[in-house]
Image (tube, helix red, strand yellow):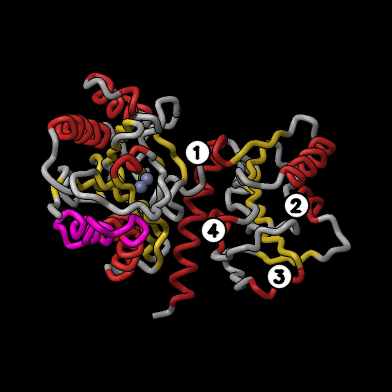
Amino acid sequence: MDTSHDTTQLLRRRWNQLNARLAVENIDGLVITGGSDMEYLTGYKAMPLERITALVALAPDADNPEPPKPTLYVPELERARVADNPEIFDLEGWDDSVNPVELVAARLDKSRRVAVSNDMWSIHVLGLQALLTQKDPTSSITTISEAFGGLRSIKSVEERNLMVKVGSLADVVATQLQQGEIPLVGRSEAQVAEDIASRLLAAGHERVEFVIVASGPNSASPHHHPGDRIIQANEMVLCDFGGKYMGYCSDTTRCVFTGPIPDEIAEAYEALHRAQAAGVSAAQPGSPLAEVDHASRGVLTEAGYGDYFVHRTGHGIGVQVHEEPYVTGQTSVTIEPGHTFSVEPGIYIDGKWGMRLEDIVVVNADGPQRCNNSPHELISVEA
Ligand code: ZN
Ligand code: ZN
């Protein structure tokens, strides 16, 4: 198999998709500096240093229906790290005697609306802005998020398949947890987290991204860092974990109870379960993404837990665990086939217990598809 050919095909499909979006959103030029977006479009993982690495692309327009080839400007001393791919981009090294932002501004030519990486350094953005307004006072700079809701937010069919696949790898471990195969009581959260990490690898992930194990009152802290606390009988254990497979991330949360489930917890979990299902059902193409948040939050509010659901309902996921689009009640994003995000409502009672139920959902033309299918019930695992 010729992998370089496959990679080039993959990158070209991504560029075609991106160029179509640039045209729709009226963006003339794009500047990507480092991070996952650059890796996604070129295969190159840039060094996040003050010497700027910038990928500059111009949108197709009426005069140039075929967009010119993008240029990757890389510090001369890092040039040897780049796997050149002349079919996808031109490579230009810059040395310390020049101002690289001037090269970028010149390459943007007559671009009036320019979108830049969300995390481009302000020193570079301000420099670029000054140069662009010198050329054309009506020019403006926006972020990639503002311009089109993230570069990688719409997943191709092959990316969606990878998300389903990596989700199934995380489910292997979630199921082991629910079947009581991962010892909990008497071990520290950190020990259990380590156990889950090695199981994520054994299930087929190439890398572990994160593991949260939060027991008893710690489960009320949504981003708890697993520590020395020894897990007891008769308490909640919240496990949230994910890894990477072929460049794409998994992320799922399941809770188990180390003993018979008290009524108070069973009642709350019943509402949580319904809230999560309502959020997933709302993930329909053409609907406002905010509806997903409203649907989950609505169920919890009606059941009296609204004040204890203290975070957004979810986040986009793909090359990074958290990426666009973010599932909040305020987002103006409309759901499109290819959007891939978590639906993860939670209830957190400070000092007592917390619970969260999380699946990744890919949106297809005919509706939402869960990437996580381990049981959604709260399961009692006896010590
Ligand atoms: Zn998670
Ligand atoms: Zn998540």
* Quarter-of-image position of residue 189: bottom left
Range of magenta residues: 169-191
Question: Crowding near pointer 2: few (<14 within 10 Å), some, many (20+)?
Answer: many
Number of marks in the image? 4
Q: Residue furthest bottom?
A: 1
Compare marks 2 and 1 and give the one earlier in the sequence.
Answer: 2
Considering the numbered disc 4 on the image, is that residue within a helix, a strand or a loop?
helix
User: Mark 4 = which residue?
Assistant: 41
User: Mark 2 = which residue?
Assistant: 104
Judge whether residue 183 is colored magenta: yes
Give the CA separation, mark 1 to mark 3.
30 Å
Give the CA separation, mark 1 to mark 4.
16 Å
Compare marks 1 and 3 and give the one earlier in the sequence.
Answer: 3
Give the CA separation, mark 2 to mark 4.
18 Å
Question: Crowding near pointer 3: few (<14 within 10 Å), some, many (20+)?
Answer: some
Identity, as a three-letter code, of the amino acid under mark 2: Val
Compare marks 3 and 2 and give the one earlier in the sequence.
Answer: 3
Front-most of residues 60 and 73: 73
User: Mark 3 = which residue?
Assistant: 78
